[in-house]
Image (tube, rainbow, N blue to C red):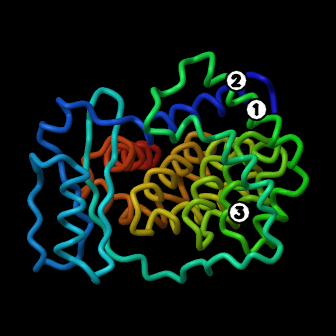
Amino acid sequence: MPTFLGHTVRTLYLLGLALAVMPLSKAQEGSTTRIESWLHQPAIGVALETTLPPREYCRDFLERNAGSGLRCGVVRYPGGLVAITLDEPDTSPQPPSDQKTSCDEAFAVQVEQAEAPFFDRTQPFPDAKHRTDISANLTAIADQNMARLVTLLDESNCARVRKAAAGLLRFTQLCRGAATQVLPFLNDLDFTVRNGAAQCINTAVIFMSPADRLRATDLAFAQMERPNHGDRNKALAIISNAMTADPQVVAHVRAHYQPRLQRIADNSALPNVGGLAKELLAKASVSAAP
């Protein structure tokens, strides 16, 4: 992977982590928060916004709907935008719980310790120098383990190890030279694995062969249908890059997926979900014009 691209990938990763761990300010906690509902049951009355702190709203929502499997998540964006997403239960098969045989816990601990500063809410988010140091440490671990990451994802029955392996994907040459090996994990049973695979494929899809790019697009649309904001936004990012790189993908999306994009555009006001879906629909429409 060229140095520039490698730094770009790592910068995007660190930004994503920053958004994931960014604490809510007091002003944000007291402001109105948009609620984005993907619920199918019309009997569940859901307002479009709330003045409750987002985590308190989710706690109350889950208590009121205990046993339903419904999900509530909090999404944060730069500039202070905060939204709550409500989703249906994930009825797809779930990954089995950890079986400690063939569980390389030393590897998992090494990755978790290297990532820990990004997820420690009791400490300020690392400054630019520390983020660079942490990124370099993760890259070194990824380089040491690159040859076995896909094997760990394929064969390990330890969720903790698979999560660590998926988290390292974006730091390796796999995201450029052998990304097709990662494609199957876009629809893994484990969200953390799908998340790592999607961030890898997002950077690699422009370098794929036309056939693999179409395959990645189809897999991303399947991922987009999962009841999870993280799946929706990462799948749309892959689709966007694939459409930008290849007119064949634009034609493929126009022929097969416009209704799905329209549903996302109609139901979401979030910039990297509904906003991006609108952009992709416009791109398909413009490309179709004589």
Q: Residues within 10 Å of mark 1 (few under 14, many from 20)?
A: some
What residue sits 44% from the left and 42% below the top?
20
Q: Amino acid at mark 1?
A: Asn
Residue 25, given in percent of the width and then of the height, sits at: 25, 31
Mark pair 1, 2: CA separation: 6 Å
Report whether 222 appears left or right of 37: right
* Near-viewer residue (101 or 188): 101
Residue 272, given in percent of the width and then of the height, sits at: 39, 43
Mark pair 1, 3: CA separation: 19 Å
Q: Quadrant of the C terminus?
A: top left
* Badge 3 or badge 2: first in the primary sequence: 2
Q: Quadrant of residue 264?
A: bottom left
Q: Amino acid at mark 2?
A: Asp
Q: Residues within 10 Å of mark 2 (few under 14, many from 20)?
A: few
Q: Amino acid at mark 3?
A: Arg
Which mark, residue 137? Answer: 1
Report whether 260 appears left or right of 231: left
Residue 148 position (above or below residue 2): below
Query: Helix, strand or loop at disc 3?
Result: helix
Mark pair 3, 2: CA separation: 24 Å
Residue 38, given in percent of the width and then of the height, sits at: 27, 66
* Near-viewer residue (149 or 109): 109
* Near-viewer residue (202 or 81): 81
Q: Quadrant of residue 152?
A: bottom right
Q: Residues within 10 Å of mark 3 (few under 14, many from 20)?
A: many
Residue 185, given in percent of the width and then of the height, sits at: 67, 65
Residues under numbered marks 1 and 2 in contact, where contact means CB atoms less than 8 Å apart: yes
Which mark, residue 162? Answer: 3
Residue 265 position (above or below residue 103): above
Residue 116 position (above or below residue 166): above
> Disc 2 designates what residue?
133
